[in-house]
Image: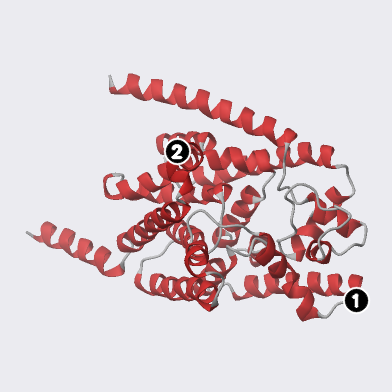
Amino acid sequence: MLKQTYHFARIALSALATTSVIFGAFLSQKSSKDLQWSGAHLLAEHINPFETFMSGDLQHRIILTQAPNYLHLLYFTLLPFGTISFDKVKLYWLIINLLVCGIIFFHIHKTTNSKIFTAIILLFLCSSPFRACLANGQTTLIIMLCFIISIKQKNNAFAGSALALAICKYSFAPALFLLSLAQKKWKALILAFAIHAITIYVFCSMFDLSFIYASILPLMVSAKAVALGNADFMSLLEINYGKNVLYYTFPITFCVLSSITYFNTTHRNPSNDIAFVSVMSLLCFKHLTYDFLFLVFALIFAATHGIKKNVMVIATVVWFWFLFGAIEKWTPFGKHYNLLITLNVILLCITLGSIWLQTLKYKQTSIQHAKFYSRES
């Protein structure tokens, strides 16, 4: 009976996952509103995309919602796409996203058994963040792959290059930077910063700008373009107190202190680290629906450390992947965004705390001692 139920559930999830992928792919060709084509297209024409946005974009060169709020490296990386029409790029970007998704699944497969892997992948493909990522032409999947490579890859050239691309979405940069320090990946860090420094220097040469001014241009765009997030301290503080000093300092301070505490009090491995860093980034800095795909690492953590001990972690993933979007859009609770963000922040705090508590050094040492004395008796 149990096998039949499992088999039926897998068939049903497979059908839903297939539908989700097809629907997301269809919407991507209708929209891809966040695909960073505009910035790459302007750069290909030797036009400063950041200043174009900041000056009001009077000629409407930035289409849809493609505000250039990523670091310079992304637009140089996307330069070949900037020379092609947007309609063609939408198709190419969809194919790239699906290929990258397959590579991510390969990495996940190496850390889980077959049954857990199948369940996680099907839930991942069924989730609203995945559909939003495809439909909007987002960079989330590419950033996620770079995230994995930068943490798990021992080769400094690969790790440094992946790290450089990962921090193009700088809302993930602080926690990832701290983890790289904790892993003592000095050469990878130096390479990543060298890549960005060279890219900014080239950008400065193209538009005759100072290095410092050019460096902060993406942050200036972000301050103007990025709306409230779904579950982070920055959005919660902005709603209640505006963009004051606390808005900028508290998330960074919390991220630094919590990360240092985690790195120094736990038995660490790459899988645990990536789960912790992902949740920390989502909690501290602004992220929208598609970025909550990063909760897949929390789901893997829950599956490998015991489902019964991680009911709240799994509930948090289910909430963000399947319930939050519908409740926000279709129920009266969507009007009370302050309460929803507060709830979401609490859920992420619980998830972060759960990952930390289950990887504590003293807890694992106590378990080992208990097993030793039970054998002795």
- Counting from the top left corner in percent of width and height, residue 28 is at 70, 36
| Residue 119 left/right relative to 44 | left
Residue at 74 percent of width and 74 percent of height: 215
Dot 2 crowding, Cα within 10 Å, few <14, some 14–19, many 20+: few
Q: Quadrant of the N terminus?
A: top left
| Residue 10 left/right relative to 247 | left
Residue 208's label in the rendered image is 1
Q: Is residue 153 above or below residue 260?
A: above
Q: Amino acid at mark 1?
A: Asp
Residue at 56 percent of width and 57 percent of height: 228
Instruction: State whether residue 183 appears in this view.
Output: no
Q: Nearer the viewer, residue 216 or 245?
A: 245
Q: Nearer the viewer, mark 1 or mark 2?
A: 2
Q: Nearer the viewer, residue 90 or 361?
A: 90
Residue furthest right in the image: 45
| Residue 79 left/right relative to 295 | right
* Secondary element at image label 2: loop
First reached walking from the N terminus: tag 1 or tag 2: 1
- Counting from the top left corner in percent of width and height, residue 88 is at 83, 38
Residue at 83 percent of width and 75 percent of height: 201
Say which quarter of the image contains residue 47: bottom right
Residue 331's label in the rendered image is 2
Q: CA distance from mark 1 to mark 2?
A: 51 Å
Q: Quadrant of the C terminus?
A: bottom left
